[in-house]
Amino acid sequence: MLEMHNVSKSFYRGTINERKALDNIDLKVNKGDFITIIGSNGAGKSTLFNCISGNILPDSGRVFLGGKDVTYEKEYVRAKEIGRLFQDPLKGTAPHMTIEENLALAYLRADFGKRTFSRITKADREFFYQKVKTLDLGLEERLDQAVGSLSGGQRQALTLLMATIVPPKLLLLDEHTAALDPATAEKIMALTEKIVKEQETTCLMITHNLSQAISVGNRTLMMEHGRIALDLDEKTRKGLKVEDLLRMFKEKTGRILDNDRMLLEE
Amino acid sequence: MLYIAQTALQLGFIYGLVSLALFLSFRVLDIADLSTDGTFVLGMAVSVAVAAKGHPFLALLVAMISGMLSGTVTAVLQTRLGIPSILAGIITNTGLYTINLAVMGFSSNIALLKQDTIFSLLQKAGIPSVTILLPLLLFAVAAFLLKNFLNTRLGLSIRATGDNRDMVSASSIDPRFTITVGLAYANTMTALAGALVGQLQRSADINSGTGVVVVGLACLIIGETIIGRKTIGRNILAVMVGSILYRFLYAIILKTRLFPIECLKLVTAVIIALAIAMPNIKASYDLRKERNHAGNA
């Protein structure tokens, strides 16, 4: 599904501040995998996502998506197959446009370039209504309201719907519940798991919640200094506790997992 | 008074096209397009030059195409060559000065002598008060097209580009393309306005674009203050109201000699600064009232 061969990326290259964000990453993601990713601050988690989505280009190495080399493909071209959510709920929606208009934009991926000059049809509207209803937030009655008037949690739920309204090949979640209050975060997470399960989406999720990291999905990566320090498959993860995870991390890297937002337990 | 009303409506609808263009570039795309002055003169020069050859209708079309090209140049400068958007507009504007001179045969002005204009032709065909009706008609068509365009999928993409650039680049829309389409569209309307003014006054002058962008913005903001900006429809209505109102004020000042003619640019600048600053002035006034009120309680 997704393969990365020897991908490296440094920032401030050639200066005294040079920092290796990704150091020869080799990663093979199978179709249907739901991988959680944890790591210290600056371990390269977000850079990894940026290289996959095309937001930044790697210095060396190759990225393959569904067998196709996409290393140098533009971000908006790749976006047809990759859905992405950020930590900031404001990043994924256009605030002055209505819920319906935002969904119509996301739905452009379905028939790209075909209906350029057509407007939102009645059928589209009904489709959006049903889709928004699955969020169970009552937003389906407010389709013509500006997205800017929604709360952070509502906006993130909408962004999740927009990213998956045309099922993407790959879904990238970058701490997408971190900026929400605990109750809302839980709701968004449940929604995420439901959608990923229904659509059998391949998904990568960065999280700082360690117990979530081992309970959600089927595989866990731990990153440190631009490398994948640990890669735990479903079997190894089973029965693992947060303390075991911390111990394994220390054994492997000789360091203590250090993330100022890390949640050790619920 | 009748004369004032006529002039205000006529110029209100024509310059309303510039405000529509600025609504698209400044409000929707969030780009201050400073090539507007030059594009306006380009439309005017092309229009008068082609009408001088005896094709007043074709003149409007060619003027619009030239405006579209000018907008595309500004867009390419910022999307493909990475020039900051304000600078891109200024660069295009500077270059257009020479282009505009060239269109007028390297003379600083050209005039139509006995040749027909679109206005004179329609007048001969027996259409009454064509100098108001034609601008009205063209403005109405432009407003209708723009409103509908902004609700198409391409239009939504353009609006999203101005609303949240982060979101657009992370979705399947190419912001370089949407900015190019938006600026080309906006400058088409600006050039049409210039083309109409040129044929109306039967001449084109290299300096006639000075301040067009500022006046256009003032009209836009005056209208928005009165009508509001809730929906696209309201926004477009605001452009029309603001544009006509501004021309009324302008015509009254001219007619009554409230200010000496020589001071007109300064008066315009003051009106515009006030109009744009009004929301802020109002906010700080309200705050002060609130504070005084709280202090007395």
Image (cartoon, coloured by chain):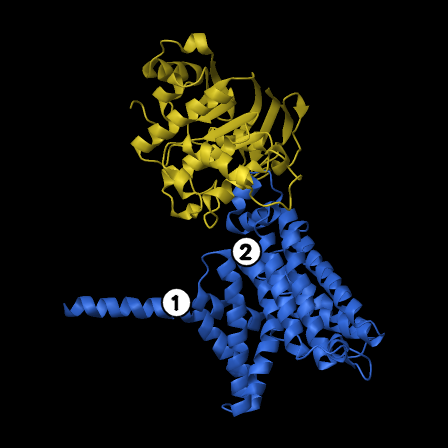
Chain colours: A yellow, B blue
Residue at which label 1 appears: B280
Note whether A246 is above or below A100 in the view shown. above
| Residue type indicated by callout 2 | Val
Q: Nearer the viewer, mark 2 or mark 1?
A: 2
Residue B236 locus on image (x, y percent): 53, 62
Query: Marks 2 and 1, Cα distance to the nearest angstrom?
Result: 21 Å
Of residues A10 and A204, the one nearer the viewer is A204
Tell me if B173 is positioned left or right of B192 in this view: left
Q: Going by the picture, which residue comes out furthest to the right? A: B53
Seen in the picture, residue B222 relative to A157 is either above or below; the reply is below
- Identify the residue shown where x is 45% and y is 57%: B230
Residue corresponding to mark 2: B28
Quadrant assignment, res A123: top right
Res. A265 visible in picture: yes
Q: Could you say whether the residue bearing mark 1 is in a helix, strand or loop? A: helix
Which residue is located at x 37 percent, y 33 percent?
A178
The amino acid pointed to by label 1 is Asn
Contact check, label 2 and label 1, Cβ < 8 Å? no
Q: Quadrant of residue A119?
A: top right
Q: Pinpoint the chain carrying mark 2.
A: B
Q: Quick check: A215 left or right of B111? A: left
In the rendered structure, the answer to whether residue B199 lies left or right of residue A95 reads: right
Q: Taking the image as drawn, is residue A44 in sight?
A: no
Q: Quadrant of the N terminus of chain B?
A: bottom right
Taking the spot 51% from the left edge, 71% from the top edge, the residue there is B242
State the residue in front, A237 or B290. Answer: B290
Figure check: B46 above or below B159: below
Q: Position of residue A265 (x, y in %)?
A: 29, 22
x%, y% of residue B208? 67, 78
